[in-house]
Amino acid sequence: MTELSERFDPGFVWGVATSAYQIEGATTEDGRGPSIWDTFAARPGHTYLGHTGDVAVDHYHRWADDVALVRDLGLGAYRFSIAWPRIQPEGKGPVEPRGLAFYDRLVDGLLESGIEPWPTLFHWDLPQALEDAGGWPERETAERFADYAEIVADALGDRIRHWTTLNEPWCAAFLGYGAGIHAPGRTEPAAALAASHHLHLAHGLAVPRIREGRPDAQVGVTLNLYAVSPADDTGRHDDAARRIDGLMNRWFLDPVLLGRYPEDVLRDVAHDLPADLVHDGDLATINAPIDFLGINYYSRHVVAAGAWPGAAEVEFVQRDWPKTASGWDIDAPGLGEVLAQVHRDYPPVPIHITENGAAFDDALEHGEVRDEDRIDFLESHLSVLADAIDAGVDVRGYFAWSLLDNFEWAEGYEKRFGLVHVDFDTLERTPKASARWYGDLARRSSTKEHS
Ligand code: IFM
């Protein structure tokens, strides 16, 4: 058997990922304005035990130690997000220089350690002032995002090559404005659809603003994609699978990569779709050529047709299947299916897996976390990834989610996704066995020092 490390080119990008609200803390420091996640988490009942990101894992003050962790693991890239409310506390207008200075220091620190910075401009922490003006369901928010993107690109663009506009617009739109389980906690189907379109538009408007005067800039967007399959092969559940694939995957892939919304999904959502949402020219803007597609992959949805007429059209089937601590099925072949779908149905585009990982019930014992389950998870997904590359899919990098245990949104600090354990009382960091395993793999693969 070929060693896993030998199955990736020496130039393959090996990294880890984080996001601002999940790790930074310091939510009122250096002029940062409130974000929708500050407001949402502060309201009782929204997060596990009322947890908030107020302190998170204090990365705002410990960033240099965290950069050293990435360097010591031997990884070449670090994906993080920039908090819009640190840069423009009101979401528009004056720039807060202390906010920019933080990312300036971080970027320099990464580069000095030989780590390529991969910033994402929006990972869900919308400035509260913009939500007060209507949030993502308002078209105006897309314009404000493009302004913000240009401010950051002007400040850091001399040192950043890879830019990601948005992280997982599906979550921001549908969990935030539809299901209401993420900030801002609204449950308005029409607003969720409007938010998704304006997130797409924000991406499309930002792409040329980031590229302006920076011919080397590589700009992409990160989508969370799922493998979707019908509950059985009778054909009875195929339409349910089509619907979920449509809403979770194609609703996001098609506008960005094909410049249109999928006709079947437009029909499915017609009763909720606001009139006049999509203006002439929007889809051409959204279809701006990108340099890479970021894919976040976690699991598969198995779906069935609703049990009786008038019930929900789709039911999510619980399989008796190995699961992560989040209750998500561990399904590495699903990553291969997602990659095959993108390869088959869309114009060629280089791909980076910008997140993949799992929460497990880790135990710190005698100063060690022996997270064999996480190693198995990473190994099985990376092996499927190598198969996809062998089959011709152009995947150029992989970022494990996450560097650190962190604030897992509505799940608070209950779910641990980190390669590095964090004691949430002392904030002490302890690399888990998976961190060493992943770092060794990346080092061996990059240098081809195979054992
Ligand atoms: O923690 C999140 C991250 O913010 C976005 N992608 C999925 C991760 C795990 O739920």
Image (cartoon, rainbow, N blue to C red):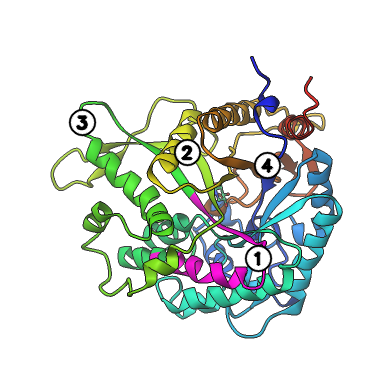
The image shows residue 242, relative to residue 40, as above or below, that is above
Q: Residue furthest top?
A: 1
- Residue receiving disc 2: 339
- Residue receiving disc 1: 215
Q: Is residue 425 left or right of residue 352?
A: right
The span from disc 1 to disc 4 (Cα, nearest Å) is 35 Å
Q: Which tag is nearer the camera, tag 2 or tag 3?
A: 2
- Residue receiving disc 3: 235
The span from disc 3 to disc 1 (Cα, nearest Å) is 49 Å
Task: Tell me the quadrant of the picture where the N terminus can be found.
Answer: top right
Q: Is residue 137 left or right of residue 84?
A: left
Disc 2 residue type?
Leu
Disc 1 residue type?
Pro
* Residue drawn at 58 percent across, 81 percent down: 92
Q: Which tag is nearer the camera, tag 4 or tag 2?
A: 2
Q: Is residue 242 visible?
A: yes
Sequence-wise, the earlier of marks 3 and 1 is 1
Sequence-wise, the earlier of marks 4 and 3 is 3
The span from disc 2 to disc 3 (Cα, nearest Å) is 24 Å
- Residue receiving disc 4: 418
* Residue drawn at 77 percent across, 23 percent down: 450
Task: Tell me the quadrant of the picture where the C terminus can be found.
Answer: top right
Disc 4 residue type?
Gly
Q: Residue furthest bottom?
A: 93
Q: What range is drawn magenta here?
A: 197-223
Q: Which tag is nearer the camera, tag 4 or tag 3?
A: 3
The span from disc 1 to disc 2 (Cα, nearest Å) is 28 Å
Element type where label 2 sits in the image: helix
Question: Assess mark 3: CB under 8 A from ligand 1?
Answer: no
